Every structure is written in structure tokens, then in C-alpha cells.
Image (cartoon, rainbow, N blue to C red):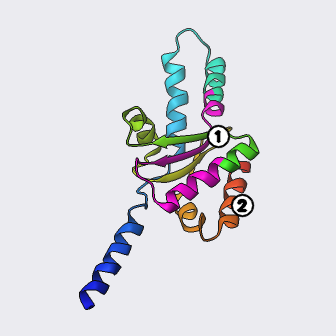
């Protein structure tokens, strides 16, 4: 009986830990590097038009990024589904990114997403906010708080 209890506790711990993410926040240096690279790599455009191109790129890929693997637990599914619903409601881009697919490896590396993650990329600044821990804590147990935090983060421009 004692072994059964120990095995049950270990199994629960491992299954809950499987959805945790090892992500890091992307800093402003990435955005600055992109802008600098554009100016130095563009021989046919002025720095002003190149800056505009960088700003347009930021707007183009701004939105909610939901990173996941091939297999998703109940919490992973809830995080993605609720984020997608809110994105549609607010007319914000939603990117469903399976990091197990080869074509998504580079994007996952850019966001430093190595597991299930939820991130917001802002349109104006290009900054990335990592909401993974909050999302996975609240998507099932407190969905209202999760959606409110997600919406307020989308509307703020950090």
C-alpha cells in the first residue's frame, strides 16, 4: 500500500511537471539587433525606410504565440483554446506553433520556447512577454483571471 501511494504521488508529479516550460524572455537587444542589421544590410534604402520596414515586421508578427508539442495535456489544451478564443474576439493574430515540427524549430528558438509556452509579442515595441507560468496556473482553475491578464497584456504596450 505504501509503494502504491509513493508511485501515485511520483506519477502525478511527473505528469504535472511535463507541461512546465523552460522559456526565457526575449530582450530589447534582439529588436535593436534586427533594426541595426537592417540598416547595415540595406544598401538600397535609407535608415528611415528601413526603420519603417522593421516596424511593419513587428506589426506583422505581433500577437499571441502558443507553443506546444505533439502531445498536449488538459491544461495545455485549455491554455491554447482560451487564448485562441480571445485572439479572435479582439481581432489579434494567434500563432499555434507545434515545436515538434521541423519548420517551427527556428521560431521556437527565436522565442526561446523549449516546451509548452504562451507569449505575447507587442506590435509597437516588438517586445515579448512570457505569460506561460500564469497561463498554466490559471487556464483551468481560474479562467476569468487568465483571460483578463491575457487581454490586459495585449492592450498594454510594454
- Quadrant where the N terminus sits is bottom left
Q: In front: mark 1 or mark 2?
A: 2
The secondary element bearing badge 2 is classed as: helix
**What is the x, y in percent for residue 149?**
68, 60
Q: Is residue 83 left or right of residue 115?
A: right
- Whether residues under marks 1 and 2 lie with C-beta atoms below 8 angstroms apart, the answer is no
Residue at the farthest left position: 3
> Is 80 within the magenta?
yes
> Is 86 within the magenta?
no
Tell me: residue 95, above or below residue 148.
above
**What is the x, y in percent for residue 100?**
37, 42
Residue at the farthest top position: 44
The residue located at (41%, 35%) in the rendering is 106
Q: Quadrant of residue 31?
A: top right
Q: Quadrant of residue 55?
A: top right
Identify the mark nearer the N-term, 1 or 2: 1
Comparing 151 with 47, the one in front is: 151
Question: Which residue is disc 1 drawn over?
Answer: 125
Task: Point out which mark residue 148 bears.
Answer: 2
The residue located at (57%, 58%) in the rendering is 78
Distance from the alpha carbon under mark 1 to that under mark 2? 21 Å
The secondary element bearing badge 1 is classed as: loop
Residue density around tag 1, few if under 14, some if 14–19, many if 20 or more, within 10 Å: some
Q: Which residues are magenta?
A: 57-84
Comparing 88 with 51, the one in front is: 88
Task: Point out which mark residue 37 bears.
Answer: none
The residue located at (71%, 54%) in the rendering is 151
Q: Is residue 97 visible?
A: yes
**What is the x, y in percent for residue 85?**
68, 49
Tell me: residue 145, above or below residue 117.
below
Tell me: residue 28, above or below residue 151.
above
Comparing 103 with 130, the one in front is: 103
Amino acid at each position: 500500500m505504501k509503494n502504491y501511494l509513493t508511485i501515485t504521488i511520483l506519477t502525478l508529479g511527473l505528469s504535472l511537471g511535463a507541461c512546465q516550460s523552460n522559456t526565457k524572455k526575449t530582450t530589447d537587444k534582439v529588436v535593436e539587433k534586427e533594426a541595426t542589421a537592417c540598416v547595415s544590410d540595406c544598401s538600397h534604402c535609407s535608415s528611415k525606410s528601413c526603420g519603417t520596414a522593421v516596424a511593419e515586421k513587428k506589426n506583422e508578427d505581433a500577437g499571441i504565440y502558443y507553443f506546444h508539442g505533439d502531445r498536449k495535456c488538459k491544461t495545455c489544451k485549455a491554455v491554447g483554446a482560451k487564448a485562441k478564443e480571445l485572439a479572435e474576439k479582439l481581432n489579434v493574430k494567434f500563432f499555434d506553433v507545434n515545436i515538434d515540427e521541423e519548420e517551427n524549430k527556428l521560431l521556437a528558438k527565436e522565442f526561446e520556447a523549449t516546451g509548452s509556452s504562451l507569449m505575447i509579442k507587442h506590435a509597437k515595441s516588438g517586445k515579448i512577454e512570457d505569460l506561460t507560468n500564469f497561463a498554466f496556473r490559471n487556464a483551468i482553475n481560474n479562467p476569468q483571471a487568465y483571460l483578463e491578464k491575457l487581454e490586459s497584456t495585449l492592450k498594454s504596450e510594454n
